[in-house]
Amino acid sequence: MNKWRFEIAACAIACAALINVTGCSTVGSAASDLGLAGAGGMAGYHLSGEKVGGAAAGAAVGYLASRVTQSEVQRKLQEAEHRGYDRALNQAVKQQYWIIQNQQRSREPADSSLARYMPVQLPETNVNGVIHNPTVAYVPIEP
């Protein structure tokens, strides 16, 4: 009876270890499917009193556990990737905002009191029959 408990404990440890490494990139999906199906089959065989039907049911449960775990790992990876893209996009928008702000600051004159205006007399003109009255325009002159 003691040997039987040891085999069950060993099977449970093997199942737990295989479930934990299922998501690891070094273990392929076929390897984890095969490992968990085999561990499930062994556990089912021993738990059912060494019946073949129990082994088949255990293997099916092990395979399903492998597939569920793999799909959960894949879903988590996709969510993490999506969050990463969102964060990168947010960071890019912030960088563009500050680039524009810095460009606008550099265009502003350091001291607007130094700007001078020069009056320019514009004479009366006739363009295509339209008469423009004489006027004075003020043009800024930078120092």
Image: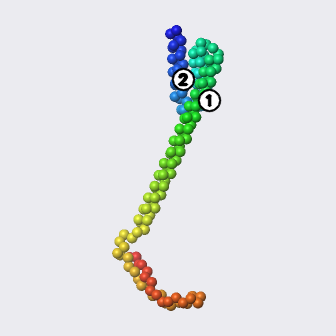
Determine which quarter of the picture holds residue 105. bottom left
> What crowding class fits label 2: few (fewer than 14 Cα within 10 Å), some (14-19), or many (20 or more)?
many
Q: What element carries label 1?
A: helix
Residue at 52%, 20% (x, y): give it: 12
Residue 58: x %, y % from top left:
60, 21
1 or 2: mark nearer the eye: 2
**In this figure, which colouring scheme has been used for the structure?**
rainbow
**Left or right relative to 106: residue 84:** right
| Alpha carbon distance from label 1 to label 2 | 15 Å
Residue at 55%, 34% (x, y): give it: 72
Relative to the observer, which residue lies in front, 94 or 64?
64
Determine which quarter of the picture holds residue 129. bottom right
Residue 25 in view in this figure: no
Residue at 65%, 16% (x, y): give it: 52
Residue 67: x %, y % from top left:
60, 31
Q: Which amino acid does label 2 sit on?
A: Cys
In the rendered structure, which disc, 1 or 2, sits on the residue that comes first in sequence?
2
Q: Residue 12 carries which label?
A: none
Determine which quarter of the picture holds residue 98. bottom left
Q: In this view, does 50 lie above or below 90?
A: above
Residue 103: x %, y % from top left:
44, 64
Residue 4: x %, y % from top left:
53, 12
Q: In this view, does 118 lie above or below 105?
A: below
Relative to the observer, which residue lies in front, 48 or 66?
48
What residue occupies the far top of the structure in this picture? 1
Quadrant occupied by the C terminus: bottom left
Mark 2 = which residue?
15
Q: How many labels does the image show?
A: 2
Q: In this view, does 12 lie above or below 67?
A: above
Mark 1 = which residue?
30
Q: What element carries label 2?
A: helix
> What crowding class fits label 1: few (fewer than 14 Cα within 10 Å), some (14-19), or many (20 or more)?
few
